[in-house]
Amino acid sequence: MEPPTLHTARLKLSAPRKDDVAAVHAECQDAAIQRFTTVPSPYLRSDAETFVELTRTWWAEGSEATWAIRLDGLLVGMIGLAKLASGGPEIGYWVSSRVRGRGVASEAARAVVEWAFAPDCPSIERIEWRAVVGNVGSARVARSVGFRYEGLLRRAHVNSLGRADVWIGGLLRDDERTPVPWPALGSGARPVADIGGA
């Protein structure tokens, strides 16, 4: 599959490139990204090199769709859909601490959802979202795009820092995209990070 470039009002989503390695490496030093995603910790430059190369393989195989999120020409995050062939891929994303709270993750997620549910992708019926319990920023992003909160998976998140409980949500092709209440967010919940994907 050829990686499409997606455009929003502010963002360009395009395939990661070799010249993104330094930016990916720098951003993945962020403790929140290491805590809330499955990136290695510590995150080495070789990890960024391997990741960028893997994204090319995933696109070629059609197994995973991964985009670099670019704002004003600068890499400010990553977003992707894993397990494409399942018909119910999982969305994952992280954005730089420099742009968190500015709607970048929601804007990028909306574009990816529209791409996944376009008429020429009829095999995708559901998109799943997961985040480590407590990652309110990621939950707010998913809710804003229309995901429904579906529950808790105990100790389902595994990375080099250990195991953690996970919130899970889903969005169906024919769901309304209007945000609905999420019990996990409750009242007064404050964002942690615009980082999703368990």
Image (spheres, grey):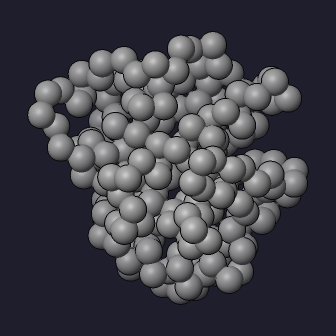
Report the residue at 58% width, 60% height from top: 69
In this orientation, which residue lies closer to the viewer: 75 or 26? Answer: 75
In this orientation, which residue lies closer to the viewer: 86 or 116? Answer: 116
Left or right, 180 with reference to 188? right
Report the residue at 47% width, 49% height from top: 105
Task: Work out which residue is located at the far front of the displayed protein and give it.
Answer: 9
In this orientation, which residue lies closer to the viewer: 4 or 10? Answer: 10
Question: Is 138 situated above or below 26?
Answer: above
Question: Is 153 situated above or below 52?
Answer: above
Question: Is 17 situated above or below 79?
Answer: below
Question: Is 83 situated above or below 162?
Answer: above
Report the residue at 18% width, 26% height from top: 186
Q: Is residue 196 visible?
A: no
Horizontal and vertical percent position of residue 85: 76, 37
Horizontal and vertical percent position of residue 183: 24, 22
Horizontal and vertical percent position of residue 48: 57, 78
Q: Quadrant of residue 151?
A: top left
Q: Is residue 110 visible?
A: yes
Left or right, 77 with reference to 68? left
Marks counted in the figure total 0
Report the residue at 53% width, 14% height from top: 176
Task: Work out which residue is located at the far left of the displayed protein and give it.
Answer: 188
Left or right, 182 with reference to 49? left
Horizontal and vertical percent position of residue 62: 81, 48
